[in-house]
Amino acid sequence: PCAVQVKLELGHRAQVRKKPTVEGFTHDWLVFVRGPEHSNIQHFVEKVVFHLSFPNPLRVRRDPPYKVEESGYAGFILPIEVYFKNKVWNHIVFI
């Protein structure tokens, strides 16, 4: 049998806004799943599901870039599911 190793990079960035939004959000943030050094992973990844803890909580990305950008004001846990095109090893959940 042939084995393929797929390396993923999961990360986030947040920065303080110069002025809060009308909703009171003080930070802009980004969370992402990508290949190391921005390598192409779409041949292996079917979709990425981000589980957020605020309105419109399920964000599904079927094509790169696999990311969500929002504004907010507090920290939170964000589970991420990566689904692979290989149905034998369907998906992994990162918390």
Image (cartoon, rainbow, N blue to C red):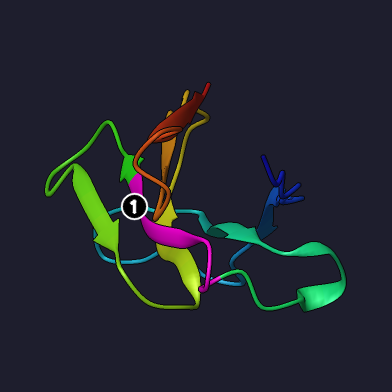
Q: Nearer the viewer, residue 86 or 33?
A: 86
Q: Which residues are magenta?
A: 42-49
Q: Is residue 84 above or below residue 44?
A: above
* Residue 83 magenta-highlighted: no
Q: Nearer the viewer, residue 32 or 1?
A: 1
Q: Position of residue 59 (x, y in %)?
A: 24, 54
**Which quadrant holds the N terminus?**
top right
Q: Residue at x 35, y 66 (%)?
A: 21
Q: Which residue is mark 1?
A: 24
Splitting the image into 4 quarters, where does residue 34 fall?
Answer: bottom right
Q: Residue at x 83, y 63 (%)?
A: 36
Is residue 5 left or right of 93 when viewed as pictured? Answer: right
Please say whether residue 51 is visible from this viewpoint: yes
* Residue 44 magenta-highlighted: yes
Q: Position of residue 13 (x, y in %)?
A: 69, 56
Q: Position of residue 44 (x, y in %)?
A: 53, 62
What amino acid is found at the position of numbered circle 1 in the picture?
Gly
What secondary structure prevails in the magenta region? strand
Residue extending farthest front: 1
Q: Is residue 53 above or below residue 26?
A: above
Q: Is residue 95 above or below residue 5?
A: above
Q: Position of residue 42 (x, y in %)?
A: 51, 73
Splitting the image into 4 quarters, where does residue 58 fall?
Answer: top left
Is residue 23 left or right of 94 when viewed as pictured? Answer: left
Q: Residue at x 52, y 73 (%)?
A: 43
Q: Residue at x 40, y 62 (%)?
A: 70
Secondary structure under the numbered disc 1 in the rendered image? loop
Q: Nearer the viewer, residue 36 or 18?
A: 36
Please say whether residue 20 is visible from this viewpoint: no
Residue extending farthest right: 37
Label 1 crowd bin: few (<14), some (14–19), many (20+), radius 10 Å: few
